[in-house]
Amino acid sequence: MTRQSLQPSGSGTWFGLLLALLGSAVLLLIVAPLLGIVLATSVSDLSRAAADREVTESIKLTLLAALAATTVSAVAGVPLAYLLARKRFWGKGLVLGIIDLPIVIPHSAAGIALLTVIGRQSPLGKHVLGGGLVGTTAGIAVAMAFVSIPFLVNAARLAFMAVPERLERAARTLGASPARVFLTVSLPLAWRGVLSGMVLMWARGISEFGAVVIIAYHPMTTPVMVFQRFNDHGLRYAVSVAVLLIAVCVTLFVVLRLLSGARDRRGDHA
Amino acid sequence: MLDLQSIGVRLGSFELADVSVTIEAGEYFVLLGPSGVGKSVLLEIVAGLIRPSAGRVLLDGRDITGLPPEQRGFSLVYQDYALFPHMTVRRNIAYGLPRARSARPAAKRRAAELAELLHITPLLARRPETLSGGQQQRVALARALAVQPRLLLLDEPLAALDTNTRFRLRKELKRINRELNTAVLHVTHDPEEAMALGDRVGILLDCRLHQVAAPQELFRRPSDPQVADFLGMRNVLPVGRVDDKICHICGVDIHVSSLTAETTHIWIKPEEIILSQEPFASSARNQFKCTVVEWDPRGSLLAVRVAAGDLSLVALITHASFDQLAIEPGRQIYATFKSSAVHCF
């Protein structure tokens, strides 16, 4: 069967036109600035930025710190997602709420809140972390993890929920322990969703400015560098760095869409 | 082998009370009941996937009520097969087998053996999503049998299949039970399936186990009218006043040759009732003038409901008789059946 959708008669009315117009306004809001910044950048500015060691170092730092945040979070966050997808327990609603908190907290405030735990003067920072994580790559990773972990946990939770529980039950009766069922049935079937959650978390970590700038101005992540160049040198110097950063994020986003797109097509067969 | 002792469970508004039953080694036991009475819940209790709120599960006299499913050695087959979609048929079948490197050749051989037993050898390299329903169910059975279960648990295993496939797999199930001598606990809502497969059948109605008996015994002696009704036995009538081989029911006298003092119900098989336009002389002792109430098709036959006073009976007739008698609601007609055709219980 072709993918042509069946339209009811009269779909070309003024209401349809209104929907199209309003929708275009939304698209314009997103596309116009992106198009604007690409048009405002000359190739020479871009290549100068790409050759600038300070810029490339900062992009590397940003990618790696966000990747570290994602990987470490996944180790604890994926089992948590499985727990939330499968078990019913007292206080589960509260746990789900806590997971979503970082999305609603202003990120600069989140950075300040983090300082009270990993800052120089905090008990943990003073006695355990040897002077706190302020101004370190580890500190940057923690700030990134704080603001982006809900994306990983929620995506993984939905992925596990989509795995039929009967498969796990059948596996148990075949002699598999709960741990083996998780590793051989649940995780392999949910991995696409888990992976797209990780990519989403990584992308979100890379783009974080508010929380990161409070924990560490130096070493400088790329979002902080965009801000610093704009403040100190003006628009022209900020634009090329910004375009580079946007290119990195868009690439990640395309990978993400490919991952979830493949999952949707699988879903069609079910 | 397996004893369920006074099993009770409460899940939300759903309740199952005081189920006790014993399943013998090698036996094919069918649990029969309408949907929503807790048959599947009982099966998952036996599997160890749900903990009962009351009662005990014993295996060879040992209490296994709290034993996790993976240590019980019972494998479960679901109605929707529950095959692992990310594994080939071969890996599905071998899932429950030892997976140490040294055990792999043996596991592969065992998977091949089972594929042969269930006639799915050509499918070993395929993925479940490419198989038909019947093929998937064969794979699910092979996977469950691979672990050499003490007891094979089947949850409506044939319900999702088309008629022909269902009949073929039904035979396979019986054959597997006999050839491997594996005990089976099979849950179904289909009385015909239960009768065809079960060495014994347990009837679960209103969340309670009403009767456990061999299939023939169930029809000969249903424990109560609900069981008879669920088995599709029409014309089961409670016996009131009795005079020497005659019972008076709803103002009508019915001759019953096998009537005894213990009889509480009689059953007149619908196919034993003859309908005719005029009364006719015969050895049959029971003949009533009735009115046709309604009719509806029942397979290749027609079920006609007639009323004689307050007595309501269903007769099964052929389409030819239906046309000949010009059956329509309100029509006057005669119903005839032998006194020896009436069963008592």
Image (cartoon, coloured by chain):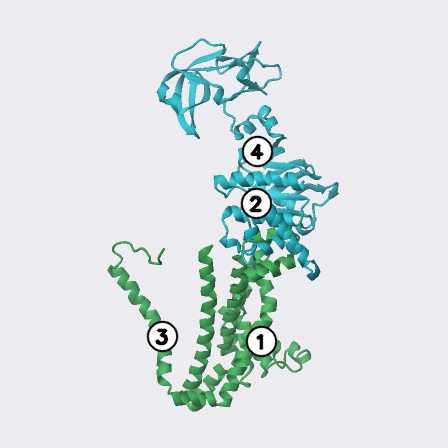
Chain colours: A green, B cyan
What residue type is disc 4 on? Ala
Q: Which residue is mark 2?
A: B12
Among the 4 quarters of the image, the one containing residue A215 = bottom right
Q: Which quadrant: the N terminus of chain B? A: top right
* Helix, strand or loop at mark 3: helix
Q: Position of residue A202 (x, y in %)?
A: 52, 73
Whether tag 4 and tag 3 are in contact, CB under 8 A, the answer is no
Q: Which numbered disc, 1 or 3, marks the residue that appears first in the sequence? A: 3
Of circles 2 and 1, which is in front?
1
**Residue A176 visible in the shown view:** no
Mark 1, residue position: A68
| Image location of residue B163, percent across then percent down | 48, 39
Q: How far separated are the C-alphas under marks 4 and 3?
A: 68 Å
Q: Nearer the viewer, residue B220 or B241?
A: B220
Which residue is at 46% across, 81% downward? Answer: A245
Q: Amino acid at mark 3?
A: Val
Look at 63% across and 47% down and name the residue there: B145
Do the residues indicated by labels 1 and 4 lie within the same chain of the protein? no
Residue B227 position by quadrant: top right
Q: Secondary structure at mark 4?
A: helix
Q: Which mark is residue B196?
A: 4
Q: Provide the chain ID for the residue under circle 2.
A: B
**Drawn side of residue B165 relative to residue B321, left or right:** right
User: Could you tell me residue A179's position as x and y percent?
Assistant: 65, 59
| Badge 1: chain ID | A
Q: Is residue B203 visible?
A: yes
